[in-house]
Amino acid sequence: MSNLVVSFDYVLTAKGGKVIDASTKGKPLIFITGLGQIIPGLETILLEMEPAQKKTVTIEAKEAYGVHDERLIYKVDRSKLPAQEIKVGDMFEVGQDGQFSPVTITAINGDEITLDGNHPLAGEDLTFAVEIVGKRPATAEELAHGHVHGAGGCHH
């Protein structure tokens, strides 16, 4: 079922149990289903759950941030970058005609810079410990605006 407002608490871990991200106590993540606002594998699981239900699930990379794609790694001359003061790990957007994608600098070899357009978590299976805080139908206004309004959402 789509067009639900779902709020949930979570702790995200990668292989080895390293915590990558977590919701802040008392401030769950809130999204509208069916709009691509969270990774597909997690949305599917959350739709099956009821309020107050807890679950720990592992989402495979292909249903999370995708598999690592070597075609998204390429080299450019330093002169093509928006800044000359750079270091490995820096992120910025590249593109043209209003189409921009984030990239990460993964190597610097003189003026040859290696960029990676994969999401930093591409290729990773992710484990989420989740608890549904609430579910309700999205309002027509929320659907028109593409985001949640009211408590925990946008206030405009």
Image (tube, rainbow, N blue to C red):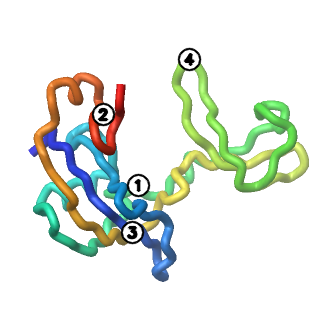
Report whether 109 appears left or right of 129: right
Outermost bottom residue = 16
The residue at 22%/73% (across/down) is: 55
Q: Quadrant of the N terminus?
A: top left
Query: Between 94 and 17, which is closer to the camera in this rendering?
Result: 17
Relative to residue 127, is residue 29 depicted above or below? above
Q: Earlier in the sequence, mark 4 or mark 1?
A: 1
Is label 4 in contact with label 1 (beta carbons under 8 Å)? no
Q: Position of residue 150 (x, y in %)?
A: 27, 36
- Mark 3 secondary-structure assignment: strand
Question: The disc labelled 3 sits on which kind of residue?
Answer: Val
Q: Tag on residue 97? A: 4
Q: CA distance from mark 4 to mark 3?
A: 37 Å
Q: Quadrant of the C terminus?
A: top left
Query: Which of the 4 quarters of the picture holds residue 147?
Result: top left
Query: Which of the 4 quarters of the picture holds residue 42?
Result: bottom left
Question: The disc labelled 1 sits on which kind of residue?
Answer: Gly
Q: Earlier in the sequence, mark 2 or mark 4?
A: 4
Outermost right residue = 110
Relative to residue 147, is residue 114 depicted above or below? below
The residue that disc 3 covers is 11
The residue that disc 1 covers is 66
Assess disc 1: are there few (<14), some (14-19) or many (≥20) residues with their C-alpha within 10 Å of its C-alpha: some
